Image: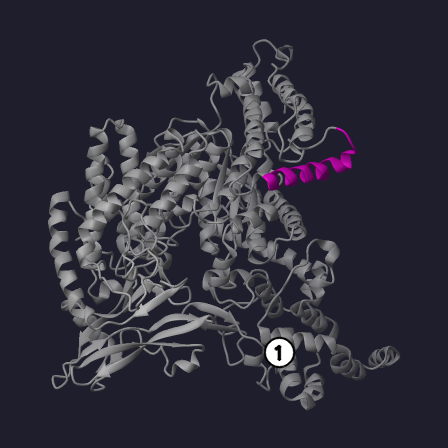
Amino acid sequence: MLVSRTMCRSVCSITTAPVGGDRTAEARSTMRRITRRTSSRPDESRLKAGSVSLKNLFVENAELNDRRLIEDYLPVNSVGEAASSEPRTKGHISTLHVWRARRPLVACRAAVYGALVPASLFIPENGPDNKKQSLGRANVAKFVDRLCKYPGNQIVIKDAQRHILEAHAERLTRETGKTVTVEEIEAGKAPRPMVLDMFAGGGAIPIEAARLGCESHALDLNPVAYLIELCTVTFPQQFGAELADDIEKWGKTILKRTQEAVSDVLARIPVARKQPRAIQRTLGDGNETPADEYSVVAYYWTRTIPCPNPQCKGTVPLYRQTWLRNKSSGYVALKPVPDMGRRIMRFQVVEARSASALGFDPSTGSAGSSTACPFCQTALDGPYVRRYGDEKGFGQQLMCVIALNPDGPGKLYLVDESLAAIEAEHQAMSEQRATEIERELGPSSLDEEIPPTGNAGLATGNSYLYGIRTFRQAFTPRQRYVLLTLAREVHHVYQEMLKQGVETERAKAIATYLGLWVSRLTDKCNGLARWNNGRETIESLTSMKRFAMMWDFPEVNLFGGATGDAWGSLEYITAAVRREGQFRNPVKVVRGSAAELPYDNGIFDAVITDPPYYDNESYSELSDVCYVWLRPTIGFLYPEHFAGQLTPKKKECVAAAYRQGGKQQARNYYEDTLFQSLQEAHRVTKPGGILIVVYAHKTTLGWATLVDALRRAGYEVAEAWPLTTETKARVAHQGDAALASSIFLVARRREAPETGSYEDQVRQDLEKIVRERVDSLWKMGITGADLVIAAVGAGLRAFTKFARVEYANGEEVPAEKFLAEVEGVVLETLLEKIFGVSGSGVAAVDGPSRFYVLWRYAYKAAEMDAGEAIVFTYGQNVELDGQNGLSSGSRALVEKKKGKYRLRDFAERGDDEKLGVPKDDGKAAPLIDILHRILWLVENQPRNLNDFLDEARPDRERLRLVAQTLAGTALAGRKDDGPEHTLATTPAEGAALKKLVANWRALIDQRLAAREGTLFELIRNSEAKK
């Protein structure tokens, strides 16, 4: 790299200074000198006349010396900690509008920065050579730690911008053969580094590229994502933070008009008290909740069905539970009281200090779709309920009204039977008015069908099967009336803005935000929402990832004053605009397919993207519920994007069996589309350009697909970094199997289509790469599944550096085969780390025991899919299924149920008298079997332990190794090998292991040593046998 050492020394002296005050004039002067030096023209006398062009030499040098920071080192722990704790609070882009699987901003910032600055940036010029690398990495860690804080220190961000532009000026100088300076780039006389996200979604990657001074491009096929991107990464930066004031002004106008229009269909409940209370929070425009009325947050409904018994004909409620508040601060539930005369259910609010003090079980309700008539006990089975709902539709009964507590925090739950008739009238009025507004607004998509089946269980066996077939049916009449009134007012205020002289593009931007506001409200304002009785809030539709049938549901009052109402949602939108409008570098947003990119060849310096993973997320289906409301609200502003009845699905890069003809066809479609997209990325990237793929799919199939697509598209994997992108709460909610990190897979364009020899080139490289990677990740404190998958990603470098890999016989090595090989080497290396012994010591432990230890290390007590579980069999000489599989027989180590696998612990296996004893052929039982039997005997039949040890005859050193490893003591004792790692089995087994290891000498060693005899006796016996 040109003058890289000089640049590094000067930059490091500035960027490692404490953050806070202004830079000194001397420091700023130094930065200017750096730019002049690093932009100087190279010595042209080195070129021989007629032999090679100056430009070609620059490109050649760039390929040799342009190693990027993310290819060498990234402080994943500090970045991951910042990412996992990134607050999704007011002002964060995630609060502008919901979008599934949006990555943390600081993780995206780290990826963009690491992709565009040189690896040598922070390496000092002076000092011992053997310490320069470690000092450089320490400097990197300090700077990146300061850079990757949310929302970000502007001084540090400006430093990062400078680093990126300096590196880019060098590359441009090489590429063009002409001197390019940072000042020329900043003045627009030379291009900024260009970054593309071709699956832009919620805009996290593009906005961070723009924040760091790049020319950022965002592309997505989905029109909802397209609008979210415009409102996140383009409009705030184009019009500035003051745009939020206009959005707030016109939003308040809409709120006032809408509330006045719909006020007569909203319940008005007088406060039952003598003294008037304080006025509730106002909307800021003079609209107040009267002091003598409750602020209604929601109406809580149960669906109902007639009893099929002709002698009864009662109205049967289908609620699944009646909890309203279920937390330590207090317990509130609805007690069902059958009215035998009227044959309807009445409800009473019961409050207690403990759940048991309620006197009934609020969790008792319909079991799935099955229930019994509370008046005559006639059973209503699932088929009857499903058939009735599908053919005639369910009724609804108001159980209670949820209101704000006028005397403090929390909610009040009110039952008023007189509201039943009033609410029926309100819903009928709402239906009539909604129909009129819908005709006025034009084309509607509300009658489009919700997909009957879909990805990740979307709608399968739920709402669609019970009569909620269209989007119209997913909303109550009042919800549709309120939302359509808001939509109509957006039309009105847009025309008013134009009449008042607001510039057309600005008016369009404001109206777009107001349209997204209406769309945002539908996430909780629908008939498939759920009441979260632990938090006393309404759970959003998209949080559940599917249109699941809700037998009891809250109908939100958008003007009720609680978090998430129309006013609060508007505040969240304006806060995000104010924050992101502070920097003025708009992203160029395009709607299109990643498989057909609308860009010229070789123009992007980096492509950084987060593609879909098979059927993990149902982006188009889940966003349809937003699309059907955006279309009547602001579709007139974007006719080319809202011409279809629903979001486009034909070219979407996901596996959707229901629309692609089956699982295999869906898999083929996804793989072909992903390959075409990566091929397009290769086309639009500069020679030697960087590609970063954010990847969080854990299955072997997912990895094999990505690796093969990358290799065939012309990319070589350079590195793989596990960055924590999930919040700690979400990981805890998903369980031990959750992948806390996303893998940032770094790849380079491969320019030469070489063929590699598996035996002579690939296999040797693989061993070296994997061992180095496992060792470095282990020392960095990366653990469990994250370590396994990151090491596998790095190992793919040996395979993908070649366009084709062949065995000695000329046969091509398929991606699945090589991936299994990589995983086997990773697991073998990892076992050496876990056990703390060499490869020969690991080999002395039997396969089932190694399998058990690996699973407990990576996934602890979680259950796994087949594709994930089978990985741990590689190199262990064991099988999951089959006659001798680990899941077969009465003493199975693994339980298999409905395609899921789970390890069985000692409590489930240890009572089998045959467990752990030698087989009929005298072959010793697996150590894990012996250990499980020992643990059970110690806990339940300690007197039988010695007899078992005599019969089992285990190798005591290997047995102790396995026991200590599972107990965690072996790992805890090696603190000189980086941060402490953990291995966790079930709580009961963990406690039993610690007890056993603490008493190992008395319980195990003495008996086995006595049986083996002294060393002299063993020698004598051995000589006698000879």
Please give the count of numbered marks on the rendered protein.
1
Residue 449 in view here: no
Question: Is 534 above or below relative to 581?
Answer: below
Which residue is the extreme one toward the bottom? 943
Residue 373 in the image: state x and y as whole percent.
22, 82
Residue drawn at (12%, 86%) of the image: 311
Query: Is the stretch drawn in magenta largely helix, strand or loop?
Result: helix
Whether the magenta-drawn stretch holds residue 500 is answered as: no
Q: Is residue 740 left or right of residue 559?
A: right
The quadrant where residue 41 appears: top right
Could you say where residue 524 lies in the image, as x and y percent from the top left?
31, 56
Q: Nearer the viewer, residue 800 or 1019?
A: 800
Q: Is residue 747 left or right of residue 1003?
A: left
Residue 134 among magenta residues: yes
Q: Helix, strand or loop at disc 1?
A: helix
* Quadrant position of residue 398: bottom left
Place residue 217 in its image quadrant.
top left
User: Residue 870, percent across and down?
Assistant: 50, 62
- Where is residue 384 shown, x and y percent of the image? 19, 76
Image quarter in which the C terminus is found: bottom right
* Residue hosting label 1: 932
The reply to whether residue 898 is visible in this rendering is yes
Q: Residue at x 20, y 42 (%)?
A: 489
Query: Which kind of residue does numbered mark 1 sit on?
Result: His
Which is nearer the eye, 960 or 234?
234
Nearer to me, 259 or 183: 259
Q: Residues within 10 Å of mark 1 (few under 14, many from 20)?
A: many
Give the residues drawn in magenta, as a range. 126-146
